[in-house]
Structures are given as structure tokens and as C-alpha cells.
Image: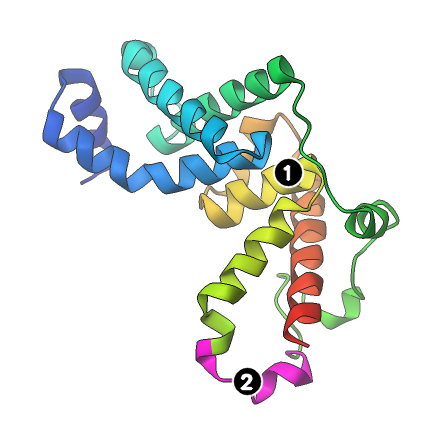
Amino acid sequence: MGEGSDLEALRHGDEGAFVELTSRLHGPMLRLAMAYVGDHHVAEDVVQEAWLTAIRSVDRFEGRSSLKTWISGIVINLARARRRKESRLVTFTSLLRGEVGRGPTVDRARFVRDGTWREPPRRWENMPEETLLGKETLARVGVAIDALPAKLREVIVLRDVSGLDNSAVSELLGISAENQRVRLHRARAAVRKALEDYLG
């Protein structure tokens, strides 16, 4: 289903299309809410409230961004408000907090300009693909993302989990493209370091 069809489903109450849309976006929205509130039940509440808000305000959606970006913005605003209301600050480890605060988490020379490995860590070369892509490894990536400071966590969740492009993320967070790029680089570097430590 395309962007226009999704929008029409919301505007005209097409139940089947709406169910398909919510099931497709539920996972990314939930992970985005989790990046702010850190509690699964609270995140579920935020996502439900976001859908209600989207349905109520869909007639005011002007199409200046994609529907997914618009709904992500609703999730962010509600999750931030919920976190403030409950005074629930997501904690992060002192190790990552210290590393990120003092500069790059790992040596920049290990990556090419687009942020991919110049050369994969040697320990990974002979590792079975099932290990690299296994559920436990993905869970470790999730733990590493959860451990990031909020400003880094929200960028990596929006870019790499929700799949939004850099301009949409910059607009949603109200930061410059350069600031967004720096935050994303630091977040990815911290996650890579945590994954490398785990796999090592």
C-alpha cells in the first residue's frame, strides 16, 4: 500500500487498510517510543495514544512530510511529554556515557566516510553468519542502543530502526543536518564497539 492509500485509509476509516497500516508501523513506533520512555508498557500506551491523535488530526495533515514522518513526530512529542510527566529518565551506563562524552567511541580510522567498517574486526571474519544475525546478537544491539544517551539514542532509532532519512530526522528533532550526522556517527560507533566487545 502506498503513502496516498495509507492517508486515505486514515481519512475515510477503512478498517482493513488501517489494520494493515498499524501492523506495519507498530514495531518502528514502539521502538521509537521505547527510546524515550524505556518501559515497554508505557511505550505501548504512547503508541496507542499516537494512533488516536493521528486519527483525530489527520484532516490537518498537510503532506509537507511523509505520513510515517508525521506519525513519528506525534510519537516523539507524546513520548517526551510522558517521560517529563512521570519524571522517568532513561538511564545509561557510565562506560558509554564517558566514552561518548569525550569524543569518538572507537578510532575513526577504522571506518570509511559513510560510516561502514574499513575492514571488519578480525574476530568476525570466521564467525558463522547465523551468529552475526542471531536473535541474541540483535538483542545485544538493542541493549547497546538503549544504553546510549537520549540525544544519540533518538537519532539512531529514527535513522536505523525507523528508517527515516536524514532531512526528516533533522526536522523532527529540530537540529541541523551536521548535528544529526555527528550524533548518528557517535551512536553507531558506540553500538559497534558494544557489539564488537560482545562478539569478541
Q: Distance between the residues labelled 1 and 2?
A: 36 Å
**Frontmost residue, 67 versus 23:** 23
Residue 125 among magenta residues: yes
Give how far across and how far down residue 52 sits, in percent: 32, 16
Q: Name the residue under label 2.
A: 127
Q: Name which of mark 1 and mark 2 comes first in the sequence.
A: 2
What span is colored magenta in the figure? 120-130
Along the line of sight, the residue nearer the viewer: 1 or 52: 52
Left or right: 46 as drawn, with respect to 77: left
Image quarter of residue 25: top left
Observer able to see residue 4 = yes
Q: Which residue is drawn at 62% across and 45% down?
A: 146
> What kind of element bears circle 1?
helix
> Which of the labelled discs sits on residue 177, or is there none?
1
Q: Residue at x 46, y 80 (%)?
A: 129
For the C terminus, the image quarter is bottom right
In front of the other: 137 or 111: 137
The reply to whether the C-beta atoms of the residues labelled 1 and 2 are less than 8 Å apart is: no
Q: Can residue 61 be seen at all in this image of the molecule?
A: no
Residue 113 found in image quarter: bottom right
Q: For the residue marked with disc 2, what is the amino acid?
A: Met
Most foreground residue, 62 or 8: 8
Residue 5: quarter of image = top left
Q: Is residue 176 left or right of residue 161?
A: right
Q: For label 2, count other residues whose C-alpha is less than 10 Å away and answer few (under 14), some (14-19) or many (20+).
A: few
Residue 144 location (% of width, % of height): 64, 53
